[in-house]
């Protein structure tokens, strides 16, 4: 689990660096954004964010909590909490993006990729099998 330093940055400084991050992300293409995320985020953080995004998108599309729990290998309490946040109006921007025809395809591709490939195990037997699944998907297209 990622940890935040107990030494807090002043809010004014945080807003500046957060805005810089948002600007950098907005200006890069897909290939650059993948590289940027790999450089900035640890493996754990990338998995955490990918699962969170996939869960939100799945729930916004009306998929069941049970399906999300099984597919993403998350706890039912995590999925339930996220569903409650969605019901409370959080993630309105993602919901609006999902409604836009131009963005809907991109967001659905994210979900489909996660569904097709699955979240690979971090260690143990079969941890590299997902690479074979990715290659099969590429060969089908």
Image (spheres, helix red, strand yellow):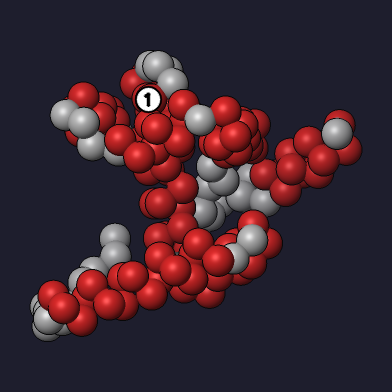
Viewer-nearest residue: 20 or 8: 20
Q: Secondary structure at mark 1?
A: helix
**Vertically, is 124 above or below 29?**
above
Q: Residue at x 42, y 60 (%)?
A: 44
**Vertically, is 71 above or below 67?**
below
Quarter of the N terminus within the rendering: bottom left
Is 78 left or right of 119, judged from the image as shown?
left
Q: Residue at x 45, y 36 (%)?
A: 97
Is 37 left or right of 6, judged from the image as shown?
right
Asked where in the image residue 54 lies, by quadrant, the reply is top left
Viewer-nearest residue: 61 or 130: 61
Q: Position of residue 77 (x, y in %)?
A: 22, 31
Viewer-nearest residue: 125 or 128: 128
* Residue 114 in view of the camera: no
* Residue 128 in view of the camera: yes
Q: Residue at x 49, y 71 (%)?
A: 24
Viewer-nearest residue: 31 or 115: 31
Q: Position of residue 113 (x, y in %)?
A: 63, 37
Asked where in the image residue 8 lies, by quadrant, the reply is bottom left
Q: Residue at x 88, y 38 (%)?
A: 139
Q: Which residue is mark 1?
A: 59
């Amino acid at each position: 689990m990622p940890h935040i330093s107990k030494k807090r940055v002043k809010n004014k400084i945080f807003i500046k660096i957060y805005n810089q991050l948002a600007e950098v992300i907005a200006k890069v293409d897909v290939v650059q954004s993948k590289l940027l995320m790999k450089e900035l985020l640890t493996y754990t953080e990338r998995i955490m964010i990918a699962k969170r995004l996939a869960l939100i998108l799945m729930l916004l599309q009306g998929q069941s909590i049970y399906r999300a729990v099984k597919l993403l290998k998350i706890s039912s309490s995590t999925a339930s909490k996220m569903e409650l946040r969605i019901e409370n109006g959080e993630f309105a921007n993602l919901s609006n993006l999902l409604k836009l025809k131009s963005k809907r395809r991109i967001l659905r591709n994210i979900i489909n990729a996660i569904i097709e490939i699955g979240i690979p195990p971090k260690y143990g037997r079969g941890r590299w099998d997902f690479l074979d699944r990715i290659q099969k998907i590429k060969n089908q297209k």
